Image (spheres, rainbow, N blue to C red):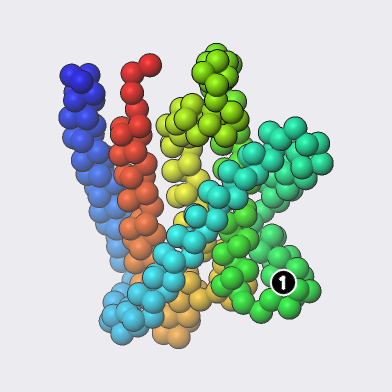
Amino acid sequence: MAGSGMSLSTAIPGSKRRLGWVLLLLLLAAAVVYAVMARVHYHWNWSVLWQYRQQFLTGWLLTVGICAMAMVLSIVLGFVLMLARMSAVLPLRMAAGCFVEMVRGSPLLVQLLLGYYMVATALAIDSPLLVGTLLLGGFQAAYLAEIFRGAVQSVGASQWEAARAVGFDLRQTYRFVIIPQALRRVMPAVAGEMVSLVKSSSLLSVIGVEELVQRVRVINSANYTALEGYIPLALAYLLLTLPLSALSKALERKLSYET
């Protein structure tokens, strides 16, 4: 208990220091941008952003919703793909392997364009939001499947033997022995993939999804501005990614224990 209390007390100040460094870097970046634009006599017009604040907020909330749905889909589908890749059924294992390798071997932008303009059109699905969310979740699921598989396979053979010795079947072995140990091992990698998913959601604008990036482009085009929308855009994405990183570290502390 003393050891866990010590690690928790030292982790909290560490998180505060990291947050302080992030804020300091943001301030320095803002100062550099202002200094550079002052040299080229750029005239800031922040009233434009305030005038279109409702559109900006609507785009940000849509991005939050897309990311939340895609995260759930990617985790569920990634777990299913992991089970399929470890299955004893050869066709199932090969199908899951082909899906993972094809998705990981091609850019998300290409998958969005082909998925929406070819596959979705052929299936008469005329919803960029639905198609974009499914493609984004499927793209991230391919990476999560390999992360999950690596974590499960990293559990020692003695753990499987111990589970069989006490009479656990395969489902009980996964539920009570393998998954609890694998879960704490995948948390850093999963958190990184979720942050990547949030940033990748900006590509959905290429198929007409009016998320945050697309709204900012429309605002800038309508008012002939260049940077007033993109600086708040970066801050809006940080509002999503920084809490994810903090949550991951909190879960790591909660799931960590002495072995």
Please identify the quarter of the rendering in which residue 129 is found: bottom right
Quadrant for the C terminus, please. top left
**Residue 231 in the image: x percent, y percent?**
36, 65
Q: Residue at x 45, y 76 (%)?
A: 215
Quadrant for the N terminus, please. top left
Counting every numbered tag in the picture gives 1
In the shown orientation, is residue 218 left or right of residue 115? left
In the shown orientation, is residue 177 left or right of residue 130? left
Give whichever of 42, 165 is nearer the camera: 165
Please identify the quarter of the rendering in which residue 58 is found: bottom left
Vertical side of 181 occupied by 65: above or below: below
**Residue 174 in the image: x percent, y percent?**
54, 32
| Badge 1 amino acid | Ala
Vertical side of 3 occupied by 120: above or below: below
Vertical side of 174 occupied by 99: above or below: below
Q: Residue at x 73, y 78 (%)?
A: 124
**Residue 81 in the image: x percent, y percent?**
65, 44
Can you see residue 212? no
Neighbour tally class for label 1: few under 14, some 14-19, many 20 plus, Cα within 10 Å: some
Which residue is denoted by mark 1 in the rendering? 120
Can you see residue 68? yes
Q: Residue at x 66, y 64 (%)?
A: 112
**Residue 258 in the image: x percent, y percent?**
33, 18
Direction right: furthest residue: 91
Give whichever of 96, 201 is nearer the camera: 96
Give whichever of 157, 241 is nearer the camera: 157
Secondary structure at badge 1 equals helix
Q: Residue at x 69, y 45 (%)?
A: 100
